[in-house]
Structure formats: structure tokens, C-alpha cells
Image (cartoon, helix red, strand yellow):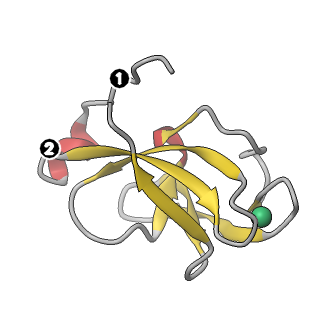
Amino acid sequence: MRKSVLKNDKYRNKRGGYSRLLEISCEKCRGFICFYQKDGPGNLRRMYLDRITKPDVPINNKMLSCKKEHLLGAKIIYKKEKRPAFRLFVDAVIKKITKS
Ligand SMILES: [Zn+2]
């Protein structure tokens, strides 16, 4: 796999400048969803669209689901930043930190 370059911008800097690249999969069927750059500490509750890379499922829909149509999250606009994101349902995805 090609080395992914993490984005470095105002969103990242606001969150302390610390980022990890996560591999996101469906909790139910373990199907791969996407890679995701998580900025800052804390749990993953939202996935911002500008941080999703190499998605294996459509991300232009209102809902996020895996290929087997398990629902994973709903699209929102994160008001503070006017940033489109998926609000993830509780325990819908599994996250694995990738070595980048
Ligand atoms: Zn699934």
C-alpha cells in the first residue's frame, strides 16, 4: 500500500496538530469502508468528508453504509466549522490505526 500523506491544515492545527490514519471497517461484517485521518485526541464520533480517503463505499449519500448495507452513520454539517461529516452510530465501525 502506498504511503498516505496526512493533511495538515487549520482543522488539524486546532485539534493540537496530532493526527493518525485509521482504517475504518463495518463492525457487523468487517467490510472495509475507508481510511480516515483522525485529528486530535478522543473518540471517533464524526467522520469529516475531507478526511476520508480511498472510500470503498459511496460517500455522497445522506447515509453511510457498508457494502452489505449495514447503516453506519448519517450525514450532518458540523455547525461550528460548516464542515460536512458523517455522525457515526454507536459501535457501528471498527477502527484500526495504520502504520503510515
Ligand atoms: Zn457491514
Q: Is residue 24 left or right of residue 44?
A: right
| N-terminal label among 2 and 1 | 1
Q: Position of residue 69 (x, y in %)?
A: 87, 64
Residue 26 drawn above or below residue 18? below
In three-dimensional space, the C-alpha distance between marks 2 and 1, rounded to whole angstroms, equals 14 Å
Front disc: 2 or 1: 1
- Is the Cβ of the residue at disc 2 closer than 8 Å to that at disc 1? no
Residue 6 drawn above or below residue 89? above
Q: Residue furthest right?
A: 68
Q: Quadrant of the C terminus?
A: top left
Residue 5 numbered tag: 1
Q: Which residue occupies the foreground of this view, 65 or 85? A: 65
Q: Is residue 53 left or right of residue 6?
A: right
Q: Which residue is painted at 36% across and 63% down in the image?
A: 80
Residue 16 drawn above or below residue 65? above
Q: Secondary structure at mark 1?
A: loop
Q: Which amino acid type corresponds to the residue marked 1 in the rendered image? A: Val
Q: Position of residue 70 (x, y in %)?
A: 81, 69
Q: Which residue is painted at 41% across and 67% down in the image?
A: 44
> Which quarter of the frame holds ligand 1?
bottom right
Q: Secondary structure at mark 2?
A: loop
Q: Which amino acid type corresponds to the residue marked 2 in the rendered image? A: Gly
Q: How many marks?
A: 2
Q: Residues within 10 Å of mark 2 (few under 14, many from 20)?
A: few
Q: Which residue occupies the foreground of this view, 26 or 83? A: 26
Q: Residue furthest top?
A: 2
Residue picked out by circle 2 = 17
